Amino acid sequence: MTAAFAGNWTVALPGLLVAAAAMLVMLVDAGWPRAEQRGLATLGLLGLAAAAGAALWRWQVGGPTSGFMDALRGDRYALFFALLVCAGAGLTLLMSIEYVEEQGLAAGEYYALVLLSAAGMVFMAAASDLLVIFLALEIMSVAVYVLAGILRSDVRGNEAAVKYFLLGAFASAFLLYGIAFFYGATGSTRLGAIAQAVGRGGLTPTMLVGTALLLVGFGFKVALVPFHVWTPDVYEGAPTAVTAFMAVGVKAAGFAAFARVFAGALGAAAPSWTGLLWVGAALTMTVGNVTAVTQTNVKRMLAYSSIAHAGYALVGLVAGSPAGGSALLFYLVAYTAMNAGAFAVLLALGRRGEPHETLGDLAGVGFRQPLLGLAMTVFMLSLAGIPPTAGFVGKFYLFSAAVDAGYVGLAVIAVLNSLISVYYYAGVVVQLYMREAGRPAFPPVERPALAAAIGAAAILTVLFGVFPAGAMEVARAAFASLR
Amino acid sequence: MPLVTLMVFAPLAGAALLGLLPREPVAGTRRAALVFALVPLLLALGVLRAFRAGAADFQLVERVAWIPAWGIEYRVGVDGISLLLVLLTAFLTPVVVLASWGDIHRWDREFYASLLVLETGMLGAFVALDLFLFYVFWELMLVPMFLVIGIWGGQRRIYATLKFVLFTLAGSLLMLVAILYGAWQVQAQTGAMSFAYERFLALRLSPREQLWLFAAFALAFAIKVPVFPLHTWLPDAHTEAPTGGSVILAGILLKMGTYGFLRFAIPLFPEAARAAAPWLVGLAVIGILYGALVAAVQPDWKRLVAYSSVSHLGFVVLGLFAFEPTAAVGAVLQMLNHGLSTGALFLLVGMIYERRHTREIAAYGGLWAVVPRFAVCLLVAMLASVGLPGLNGFVGEFLILLGAFRTRPVATAWATSGVIFAALYLLWMYQRVAFGPVTHAENRRLADLGRRELAVLVPVLGLCVAIGLYPAPLLRVAQPSVERMLARLARPVAGVQVAAVGEGR
């Protein structure tokens, strides 16, 4: 009894630590009204570090991989995402410190919401029960809805929050409906039980409907076409630090649950859904990239590009092989580093009430602020998939898995999409180095925390590009634990 | 001592050091850049010393496991073909650095750093013996060139540089898919995934597979060469690039394409290459004639030289796809020759542009009397490009035509007329620029070449003469490796006779 009890809590440990950090931040903020906002951020970072440490410890020593009657898993897959979410949330906190100060945001609320949302993400990746996935997804989402509108006087932010909330609630309903179908068909919401049922008799018509509904729900969270229409408005309207968090954290957690359900529980019936995902991946890449080409606002462009990247990542799921799954995981790592970095650079260019985020605002930055320009160049090259960056290795991995699984056509569509994407990512570099500034730039502000976030993201982007073997092995081990 | 690796990464280290140096004084930056560019040249000469001429195999092979999960190795080495191109690269880069002292007047540090990164990419692509590594270096070249054209180029530089990047990537991304397909085939056939060159050589592929893979590789290389009708990026990129960029582009980057054909597309997929040869030979001949005719009517001096590259590279492609040893050796030699003579022409155009700020041929005339040293250098470079006996261009073109005539007489006959066209447009250009009366008053006050400019040109032109008079050592280096590549074509089915093409350690 006690062993099982202790096992339950060790399985949940990383997520609990993140949640505890969120509570602590809230309490400290409430109990000590004079608490420094930097102190709160440090508290949050420490909490994330503790959670990451716990995940690493569990990765090293092993131990129980299932808890709470198999509603929650502590397998390497869950631990991998716990680490990834902690890294993403950590970068978000780091780039928010000066932002919260400059905007005069309520620091306690802001940090607590980020952490709470991160806790939801960690649990989402660990959940092995459709209802727990749903609960974790809501914990994550509700916090992000609030974060999107946290600049209360900002019209665009309000629009973003309302839009995200309404459409998000709608998508959650689809997800819940899909869960109901599965419960009806198998009598359980446990993924293990569903996997057994699917293994025995394949997808029954009821389950097929359920699968389609789940696909809508997950598709919304990771912004697959045609469930992507909210993305540009929400990404553009939300405060940039929150956008970064949405782009990396929400997407990673969405894919975590998506892949656990589809590649894990429904893996035996893969032939009945891969065709759909094939089309989804091709459409998502193409729509995302083609629309991004026409954007003049970099934030909006990155929103469309994040849609395209969801399409690339989906290629791994279509491939369905261990290589495909590991590629998906590795790609999410690369994506977290390069995308968080790109948004952080946008943060660095603006100041209170005057975001500098159009293409023209980037003009001449490369020579005015050489390090910032270099970092942005690294992120753009990586997003475009040009070596020696993590984005290149990630795409290489994904497309390689697709070719191996026999989806050469999809790989060709994907590389042609990469070509389209080079046009607009190179466009950013053109602005950085090859155009004269249009309107006067702000004198660079010292923002050490933000600079640290950008530097860390840039170093990781190059590091995983030049020496990817270690991270790839981790991704492989993580995906292998799913089966 | 890992000589090849040191040589490849020395420029990258130089670029990093350059970034640490203070921006002022500019003279210090320039000298440092020159020193950093001379280091790889010395190392390349060291590689030449250590190289055993007369052997076909890869030598000085260095290997380290890189991404074991995919069987990817960091593996480099040189054979006769890559050695010559490595030497060309290491030689032209310091020349370009020195030439750019007069041409680049802003962001010097960044410019030279870009050039050095570019050099690492080029050297790496020439020595890579793992297809993943090759691809990484291949793409690595793109970024600095993109910056060089886009930041330091002419009026339409942004259009030109984006066009260059998108064209190049369009081909190379499809090549990436082909490389991936090949690697998985290696796994299917040997049980372990690998991107190693000799594993790819040992692949057994159905004719259909060969054709698709060849098409993907050939497209990437044909864009780079460029083979007609994929050449449209070239005139823009060459014309808009700063002098140094044009020299590197014409001198080395275009050779990436022909090198790729010789190293990868032909030996890896010999049957497909044989099937495609008539088409490529045809396109090469069209390129030779088309390039020459278009060059003849260019009012812009630099554009004329750019189009002449299309024509000259056509000879190289003809030599490669004639599948005849003499022609292929000539093609390798011609890669070098074109790098030197066209490089010299671009340098000279750049030097006169620095003085007059126009590239209109009509704006010149009578330069022989005003700037005799310039006119003599131009004469040598121009004649080398024409292919006058005694200069390097002759040897290469002659060998190509001689060899190709045996296997492709009709195409060669047409190509030979390209030689005449080349003489026509280049001599006519020279006549309009150097002879006759001085028609523009501004030209009377032109300063002749200074000491730095002579230091740039004399080594290049000296090599043109030296190779023209005594090409035998170069031929001896290249011949065994070229013949080994072609030997794969002679065999009915590739793959079984792998032992013969194993690598030398």
Image (cartoon, rainbow, N blue to C red):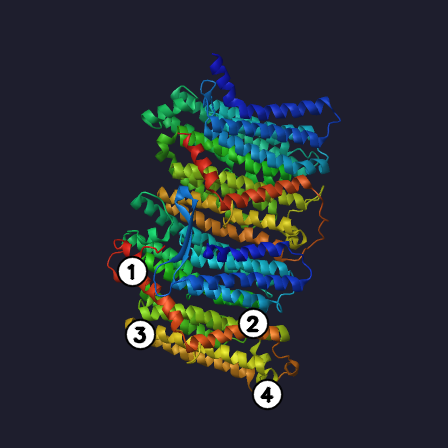
Residue that label 2 marks:
B456
Left or right of A304 in this view: B446: right
The secondary structure type at the circle numbered 3 is: helix
- The secondary element bearing badge 2 is classed as helix
Residue A279 location (% of width, % of height): 42, 41
Q: Position of residue B207 (x, y in %)?
A: 28, 54
- Amino acid carrying label 1: it is Arg
Distance, label 3 to label 4, CA atoms, is 43 Å
Residue at disc 1, secondary structure: helix
User: Is mark 3 in CB contact (under 8 Å) with mark 2?
Assistant: no
Of all chains, the one bearing label 4 is: B
Q: Nearer the viewer, mark 4 or mark 1?
A: 1
Q: CA distance from mark 3 to mark 2?
A: 37 Å
In the image, which is nearer the foreground, mark 3 or mark 1? 1
Residue identifier under label 1: B488
**Residue beneath label 3, please?**
B405
Q: Which callout, 1 or 2, points at the residue further toward the start of the chain?
A: 2
Disc assigned to residue B215: none
Indicate the amino acid at tag 3: Phe
Q: Which mark is residue B437?
A: 4
Decide which of B394, A192 is in the foreground and name it: B394
Pointer 3 or 1: first along the chain: 3
Q: Position of residue B27 (x, y in %)?
A: 66, 64
Residue furthest to the top in view is A1
3 vs 4, front mark = 3
Marks 4 and 1, how far apart in space? 57 Å
Nearer-the-camera pick, B261 or A355 = B261
Q: Residues within 10 Å of mark 4 (few under 14, many from 20)?
A: some
Q: Amino acid at mark 2?
A: Val
Q: Nearer the viewer, mark 3 or mark 2?
A: 2
Q: Amino acid at mark 4?
A: Pro
Label 1 resides on the chain identified as: B
